[in-house]
Image (tube, grey):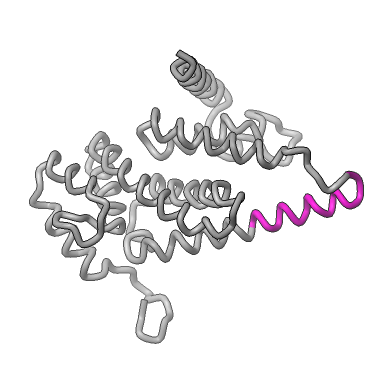
Amino acid sequence: MSEDGSDPEELVHPAFVARALDWARQLTPEQLLTAASIDRPGASGYLPEAALARLVRRYRLEGSRELSDRLSQPLIARAYAYALAICGRFGENKEELAHEAMISFLDDLAKVDSIDWWEITFHRELRNRVKDAYRRLFKRHRQRSVEFADEHERSDGGKLANRLARDASLAGLAGKYLKTPERRRLFMLIMAGDLPIDAPDAPNDLVRLTGKAKSTLANLKSEFTRIVQDALAEKGS
């Protein structure tokens, strides 16, 4: 950000990120993963989130997919904890807000290769995504209230609470069993059940949203369903 507060025309890593990246180049993969696990700012070996975002992308571009995926895990954990802390003021909606902000972050992390604001002002960008999520959530709730006023009682019978609990549970499963941000994103989209896989006459469907074939999404749904079933069986044992 420039001195007058406006965004610069060319994005560059700030000095603290550049130093962290230079230091990271000297580390072995094992040392790098150890450093990435340090989540206390100021601690020896700490890698800031902005630098981790670049490292996740760097190793993906260089073909070291496994290292990229493993580095993404502590980054996602830190981001989710920060998002939840920000969303705490929203009470019962904090999980839904954090979830929507994280979906936006994971989408950028998986699809963007060039430098962006996640690699410059990570926490500011995450706060902005939470604000965007709040606006979308408020709009949905306002529309829901109008519909209730016209046709229903204002109580939704616990539907919103159930959906929040469902999304929080799915996010936990995705983080535990799926390695890549893209697969976690697909897991959330498919298992939430909010959209059909293929429905040309509907306003949207998963084929159009993800750009993937109907057969691919059907196979993923089967795979993800087994993950949920195995997790439930493990919990019940």
Considering only vertical position in the picture, is 151 above or below 40?
above
Q: Quadrant of the C terminus?
A: top left
| Position of residue 33 in the picture relative to residue 2 (left or right) | left
Q: Quadrant of the N terminus?
A: bottom left
Considering only vertical position in the picture, is 222 above or below 25?
above
Identify the residue at horizontal 40%, vertical 40% (top origin).
181
Q: Quadrant of residue 73?
A: top left
Please state the extent of the stretch shown in magenta in the rendering. 136-152
| Position of residue 97 in the picture relative to residue 31 (left or right) | right
Tell me where residue 176 appears, x and y as whole percent: 39, 31
Considering only vertical position in the picture, is 134 above or below 80?
below
Identify the residue at horizontal 59%, vertical 57% (top origin).
90
Please name the predominant secondary structure of the magenta segment in the image: helix
Q: Is residue 130 magenta?
A: no
| Position of residue 24 in the picture relative to residue 142 (left or right) | left
| Position of residue 235 in the picture relative to residue 20 (left or right) | right
Q: Is residue 141 magenta?
A: yes
Identify the residue at horizontal 85%, vertical 49% (top origin).
147
